Image (cartoon, grey):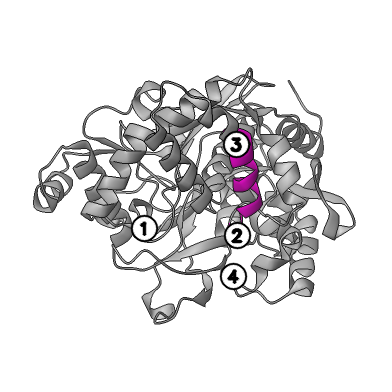
Amino acid sequence: MAYQTIDEANKAVVQKMIGSAPFLTDVVPAHTVIPELTEHVLLHAGPPIKYENMTDPMQGSCVGAILFEGWAEDEQGARELLENNKITFIPCHHVNAVGPMGGITSMNMPLVVVVNKEHGNEAYCTLNEGIGAVLRFGSYSDQVLTRLHWMNDVLGPVLSKALKTMDEGLNVNVLVAKAIAMGDEFHQRNIAASLAFLKEVAPAITSLEDVSLKDREEVMQFLADTDQFFLNVAMATAKAMTDAARTIEHGTIVTAMCRNGENFGIRIAGMGDEWFTAPVNTPQGLYFTGYSAEDANTDIGDSAITETIGVGGMVMIAAPAVTRFVGSGGFNDALETSNNMAEITEQENPNFIIPTWDFKGAPTGIDARKVVESGILPVINTGIAHKVAGFGQIGAGTVNPPIECFEKAITAYAAKLGFEA
């Protein structure tokens, strides 16, 4: 379809996001939905990157994934595979997926499946591991590997069976609408959404007669303990929404934001699959006791897909409780942030109403033109990883994309339209 103006195209792109109908339908082994995931292939977060340019936490995650899959017997064997180019890397975004922090995903890891029933596409994300020593921050200890195998053998299959007892799966828009009214922003705070998810699946899990009582109890306890469990569902949901909108292939609305520790990358609707990158920033925020900015890794992960659909840092006002956690002040700072985000977005999302913002909808559809014209950059809420693999999360904060990403995208789109520089 031809659009007369960029504004008209942008409105159509955002309407396709807002009109999405994402449903969580299953949890499956990654290779069953991503055929590219075969032996010695790993997915990673962010735009394309070489192994040697990955930061230590992402490299550590690669080691852990190789050990989980049994492609090597020990760390030395895993690093030999990596350093001798025996592992093929693919960005998660290139295969309908997203991954938190390092984003490292291998063939047998369980993925949530979110189906956009309005537009017919699917998106995937790994399951949230909880806190502490976890693969996504680069840990690969026996404890981490044991948990990953439990998630593969027990958690994933139990959730799959529970979701299949529901006629359509779980309507994610409904869960998000409930939780945003309860103080979640879906990047750093998912407590309400995770509890709402548990409320929906608990009856189904307890009724699974072909699952042992021990497994059912362990799954229920894990879900009750994992406050950030819903983040990964939100990420797959956002990916399903933005991938549907990308099919319009016109306009300046941002359809992906992600980072790999080396570069920040964005896509805009009118430029399809092309990445526009610039050196990534380091998050600013609060650190756990014993850590400081000197310990922080550069920005990393696909979780900024949440801000791309208008939640996360975009709706800081919805979650004033999180503002102190990410070091951004209090209610007034949260209000200012969301008001600024409204300046660079196309419209409000009526599906995600925010009571603390006078019942406005979430500011949705970042317009790269408005970012360049105003100089206002999207605010991304994020965890802060230690720069050394194995330490895990050492704080939380906010980060901005480099404005060069948006400038490059607008310049490229102008050239595509035939405008001279």
Amino acid type, residue under disc 1 in the picture: Phe
Query: Which residue corresponds to the image point at 25% horizontal and 47% vertical from the top-left?
Result: 145
For marks 2 and 4 on the same chain, the one whose residue lies earlier in the sequence: 4
Would you call the spot at circle 2 few (<14 residues within 10 Å), some (14-19), or many (20 or more)? many
The CA span between labels 1 and 2 is 18 Å
Would you call the spot at circle 3 few (<14 residues within 10 Å), some (14-19), or many (20 or more)? many
The boundaries of the magenta stretch are 188-201
For marks 3 and 1 on the same chain, the one whose residue lies earlier in the sequence: 1
Helix, strand, or loop for circle 4?
Answer: loop
Instruction: Name the quadrant containing residue 397.
Output: bottom right
User: Disc 4 designates what residue?
Assistant: 326
Helix, strand, or loop for circle 2?
Answer: strand
For marks 3 and 4 on the same chain, the one whose residue lies earlier in the sequence: 3
User: Disc 2 designates what residue?
Assistant: 380
Q: Position of residue 56 (x, y in %)?
A: 28, 61
Would you call the spot at circle 4 few (<14 residues within 10 Å), some (14-19), or many (20 or more)? many
Circle nearer the viewer, 2 or 3: 3
- Residue 115, above or below 233: above
Looking at the magenta stretch, what is its main secondary structure?
A: helix
Query: Which residue corresponds to the image point at 71% horizontal and 61% vertical from the top-left?
Result: 319
User: Disc 3 designates what residue?
Assistant: 237
The CA span between labels 2 and 4 is 10 Å
Amino acid type, residue under disc 2 in the picture: Ile
- Residue 41, above or below 285: above
Q: Is residue 195 magenta?
A: yes
